[in-house]
Amino acid sequence: MSIIIGLTGGIASGKSTVSSLLIDKGITVIDADLEARLAVEKGEEAYDEIIAHFGNHILLEDGSIDRGKLGSIIFHNESQRLRLNNIVHPAVRKRMLAKKDQAIANGEKLVILDIPLLFESKLTYMVDKTILVFVDEYNQLERLMKRNQLSKEEALARINSQMPLKDKIQLADAVIDNSGTIKETEQQLIEILNKWNAL
Ligand SMILES: CC(C)(COP(=O)(O)OP(=O)(O)OC[C@H]1O[C@@H](n2cnc3c(N)ncnc32)[C@H](O)[C@@H]1O)[C@@H](O)C(=O)NCCC(=O)NCCS
Ligand SMILES: Nc1ncnc2c1ncn2[C@@H]1O[C@H](COP(=O)(O)OP(=O)(O)OP(=O)(O)O)[C@@H](O)[C@H]1O
């Protein structure tokens, strides 16, 4: 029997940091952001649909999607964001479920699905348990501005396009507070996995 854990959080809350700790332990992590990137590559159905809806001006010279430009549209406009979600999410779900099934078929005991919008998109049916990677508002904004080289306004637009992190606490089976050091985050992670007998 495999245990499937949904790892979620908010933008820049530390999901990838926690994922790296898991990958270092040899655990399979299926990353929704990565699958979403692959799903919109040239030649994919979602790529054509995005251009049909948003227009050629969101393309870079090499024909790939200008993610910065598309981001600045959809993080400032809810209806455009929902439209993009409708185009991309079905393909992401399909890719993730196929990889999850493969990991189960390989007999892996623990499989992690890293899904930023797990609660917003009501995807908890895909997993057995959920872990929320939480960070306080100050650190979230600081880390996002620094990592993505964003202004405060741009960073807040991204944060505000998601369910508030504090509202996700009640929805999760376990919470890791990543406001401190990575060592403290790792300790919380191990404690949760041990409690669930998942290691
Ligand atoms: C808007 C896009 C082009 C921006 O690309 P960019 O490379 O700058 O960011 P990246 O994809 O690495 O996402 C960073 C984070 O932004 C947040 N985010 C991304 N898309 C969304 C969205 N539609 N709604 C809310 N938050 C989002 C997530 O927390 C994600 O971890 C890209 O995020 C995208 O295509 N989004 C739609 C698909 C999607 O929902 N992906 C999220 C997981 S399925
Ligand atoms: N405990 C920590 N202390 C200091 N910096 C941290 C900590 N955890 C994460 N960071 C940094 O904060 C930024 C966001 O972390 P990370 O990329 O793991 O978040 P994420 O939830 O995967 O983000 P996104 O969903 O936006 O891709 C990164 O630059 C990362 O190096």
Image (tube, helix red, strand yellow):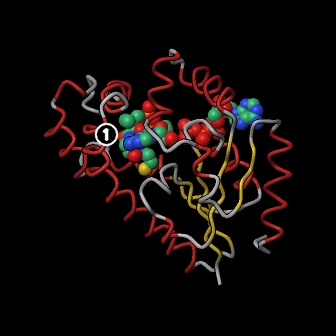
Mark 1 C-beta to ligand 1 under 8 Å: yes
Closest to the observer, 64 or 143: 143
Q: Quadrant of residue 77?
A: top left
Q: Is residue 37 visible?
A: no
Amino acid at circle 1: Arg
The residue most toward the top is 151
Q: Is residue 131 visible?
A: yes
Give the vertical position of 52 relative to 90 (above or below). above
Q: Residue at x 23, y 47 (%)?
A: 43
Q: Position of residue 75 (x, y in %)?
A: 37, 31
Residue 85: image location, x then y, percent = 32, 48
- Residue labelled with disc 1: 81
Q: Position of residue 93 (x, y in %)?
A: 39, 62
Query: Where is residue 52 shown, x and y percent of the image?
Result: 13, 40
Left or right of residue 74: residue 110: right
Q: Is residue 55 rendered to the left or right of residue 188?
A: left
The residue that appears at 81% across and 36% down in the rendered structure is 180
Say how many tags the image has: 1
